[in-house]
Amino acid sequence: MPEGYTEVSEIELAKNAATGDEAAFAEIVRRFSPRVFRVASRFFRQRELVEEAAQEAFLKAFVQLKNYEGRGSLEGWLTRVTTNTCLNLLRSAKRQPQYEVSPMTENEAEWLEDQMSNKAFEKLRSDEQKMVAADLVDRVIGTLKPDDRLVLILMDGEENSVKDVAEMTGWTESKVKVQAFRARGRMRKAVLELLERSKNYIQGTVAGEKPR
Amino acid sequence: MKDKHIGDLIQENRIKDLSDADTTFVEAHMKQCPRCRMEFEAARIASVLLESRAAQTLEPSPFFEARVMNAWRERQAALMPLADRLWQAWNDTKLLVSGLATSLAVLLVLTFAGPGIRNDALLQASADDPYSAESILFAHQEVAGDLTDVDLLTEIYGDDDTEN
């Protein structure tokens, strides 16, 4: 445990770490792991993938630390590095988005049916329903491009402002607005497709057919 | 105004950010346009899904810091020039090598000098015992050269025939 660095300021910590000081870098990892993890969780859901992305973000941050001038907070700077690292990981992933929602489970179809009848708000409170919703949203946003996914989670999920998203991603505010506009359209289309499938699923189940 | 579809409006803004005037317009329009009603429902569900996804966050495991630092060390080592890497490797193994050399030296000393010390000690111990073979030989040192094996054994163990 690098005790000598626990009280050190962010700028000093960054300067020392940039020179290859292992204890200073370890303190950065210790101090900002929760934040970096939270950012990586926006892109990936499985713990293993989140850990890999967070680790890669820290290693990339170390290389880029010499560029940190202390104008903003180190946390904000690390958030941007992590965001870009995760985006690049997603873009370079072998498995590209399929642009088509994969078949849904019975629970998911039921959840959508409840949504349409406005019953889901109460049901969403249960942990089980939260899991169903989480599985479903991964299925939907899995069909979107990484940039769409990011902007939707940041703006519509976490309710960040256009300015905040621009800071986190390094994009211009205009780009954030355009990206959000297009992403919302694509997301809505994916949900409409899901609703259509849900209707077919329910009808198929009632008629005793094997659901698609 | 009511004839205008709501697609762009709900794409430009989050649903919960719609102004009162926009909300009134959307509600009025949806009553006469089933397609827009469906679009609005889809946007509302998308919003609920995204909020539930955003609420999911993971905490780092207790081993995460160690994992990152190990990866960092490995990457640092890989980035080092060959000469530096060899020097680093030598520094890391120097203690081990010097330890091994010391152990080897101790073993050599014990192997070659050890038995001599032990023999001298044994001889000294035997010399202190008046009945040992060495004491008898030393006592007859002046004639030891003339003693035959039988004489020597007789001196040590006595004459069995005489005793019988």
Image: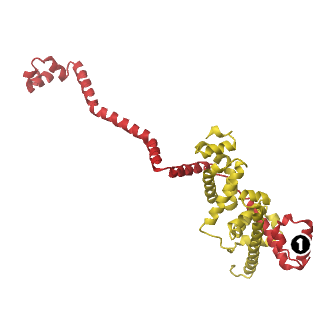
Quadrant assignment, res A19: top right
Which quadrant of the structure image shows residue A79?
bottom right
Specify the color scheme: by chain
Quarter containing the N terminus of chain B: bottom right
Residue in the picture at 79% in, 66% down: B47
Q: Is residue A114 above or below residue A211?
A: above
Q: Which residue is mark 1?
A: B26
Residue A119 at x, y percent in the picture: 83, 68
What quarter of the picture does the C terminus of chain B occupy?
A: top left
Residue at 75% x, 67% y is A179
Report x, y in % for residue B79.
52, 52
Q: Nearer the viewer, residue A193 or A112?
A: A193
Q: Is residue B84 above or below residue A53?
A: above
Chain at tag 1: B
**Which x, y percent locates residue A15?**
64, 44
Look at the image and give the colour of chain B: red
| Residue B135 in view of the camera | yes
